[in-house]
Image: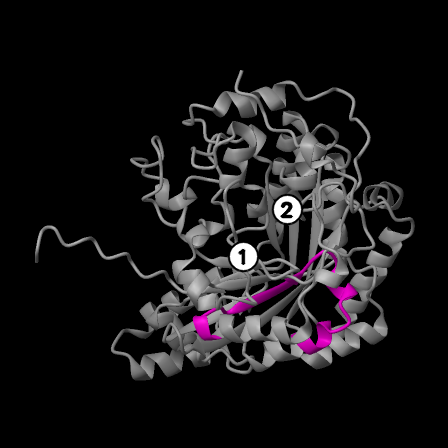
Amino acid sequence: MNAIEPTPRRAAEPPLGLILELTHRCPLQCPYCSNPLELARASAELDTASWCAVMEQGAALGALQVHFTGGEPMARRDLPALVRRAAELGLYSNLITSGVLLDAASIATLVEAGIDHIQLSFQDIDAEAGDDVAGLSGAHARKLQAAELIKSSGLPLTLNFVIQRRNAERVPRMLALAEALGAGRVEIAHVQYYGWGLRNRAALLPSRAQLDFTTEVVEAARARLKGRMVIDYVVPDYYARRPKACMGGWARREMVITPTGKAMPCHAADSLPGFAFASVTETSLAEIWSADPAFLRFRGTDWMPEPCHSCDRREIDWGGCRCQAFAMTGDPARTDPACALSPDHALMQAVAFERPETAPPYLYRRIGAAEPAEAPVEAAD
Amino acid sequence: MSGVLTEEIVPAFRPGAKFRFDAVRKAWVVLAPERLFVPDEPAVAVLQLVDGKRSLGAIVDDLAARFNAPRPVIAEDVAAMLTDLAAKGAIRL
């Protein structure tokens, strides 16, 4: 071999999943929504044929799962048609829903179309508190109804509880509900602080003691329910010593498609400066996955700075989260400050340390509610 | 499920779990809610016998007739593999 021959770029493994954000429309206004601060309007959403083309290209590329999410994906009238196309393509389909638009007729239609699994989100176990987070009165009662409908349809059900400072003490009751409903899987997922969650961080971030309590409860339940109910647990990064493997690594497993058809490596990538994401209406998924500069930018380990580059965990956590590195330091190419080895780790600790004793009110997720100019970028001093 | 499995139990895929061949990867895959496994060759041989009707004992008999290993060794391997898949939410024991 010629020594000056360039190292061939390793071909990317095929993606495992397609995350389709069908719409940003949602009857709920949760202040930790993973959607961007700037929400897409209905008129700008991809049409049915375009979503079908995305799934066809994705399946050919090797994707095995499709996640229908939003906003509220059930706000799309063509959802059953999209589910049917996914089933025809052999894609494992997962509906991520708030449940408030679900009734006996719509669940029957989804089952008939071939949906494989439904994940139902809860804001709390207490109805009043849950409705307060959702910004919609009666939401919690409708979710309970949806859970019963999903269960009696025979579909596998995952309950997703979003944990924050106002409900951390109620995790035992959340697990009890999941058990009583016979859910096969439950997610106890602390809020992740991006987009709306980042804007509302002071109103949501739990204390260290609250986090320790939820960890203890989850560990005990896991031991007790082993083999019967799977419990996934997601922690906030602010008390961590090692970062999470965000998205399983940048552009390594999943492809997110926004309501308007932008292809991104993660939900929050839109917050990063200097990226132009390709549109699925103009570029094929295969081309985007293998050659789009935004997908290549942080894929693998070559891009990593120290201390990541020589770290033996570099292929475990993949350097953590790029959006968090940017939100905290202003530079998306730095080590995730959630890592105790990061030179910026003190920024994360400071947020936890300066957490207000009293929670401020929520800034609800509404079109136009967030002024982009006020996005909280942490200063380094 | 805890402790030692008896050979009478009948393993089955959990509702929502799918076991299929992926033509792109040229490999068998197990798809379950928010889970995805690419089982190795011995696991594929076991999973192809999981149909909600065969008992654990019948699965072990079948494998013992086809593979050159003592039955108790196969029985132990199969039980460990199924227990692991049950913990991951793909199999019901």
Q: Quadrant of the N terminus of chain A?
A: bottom left
Identify the magenta region. Answer: A60-82
Number of numbered tags placed on the structure image:
2
Seen as rendered, the residue at the extreme top is: A381
Is A13 on the left or on the right of A278, as rendered?
left
Which percent across, then down, holds residue A47? 68, 71
Secondary-structure class at tag 1: loop
Q: Is residue A329 left or right of residue A118?
A: left
On the question of residue A182 being in view, the answer is no
Provide residue B15's location: percent of width, then percent of height: 63, 72
- Say if the magenta span includes residue A276: no
Kindly indicate the quadrant of the structure image that contains residue A292: bottom left
SS at mark 2 in the image: helix
Q: Nearer the viewer, residue A53 or A205?
A: A53
The x, y position of residue A341, in whole percent, is: 41, 27
> Which residue bears the numbered disc 2?
A221
How packed mark 2 is, by other alpha carbons closer than 10 Å (few <14, some 14-19, many 20 or more), is: some
* Mark 1 lies on residue: B2
Q: Residue at x 85, y 62 (%)?
A: A145
Pick the residue in front: A314 or A1.
A1
Write down the chain letter for disc 2.
A
Q: Is residue B35 above or below residue A204?
A: below
Which of the chains bears the disc numbered 1? Answer: B
For the question of whether residue A194 can be seen, the reply is yes
Q: Quadrant of residue A149?
A: bottom right
In the picture, the disc for residue A120 is: none
| Mark 1 residue type | Ser
Q: Residue at x 42, y 52 (%)?
A: A293
Q: How many neighbours does mark 1 have within 10 angstroms: few (below 14), some (14-19), or many (20 or more)?
A: few
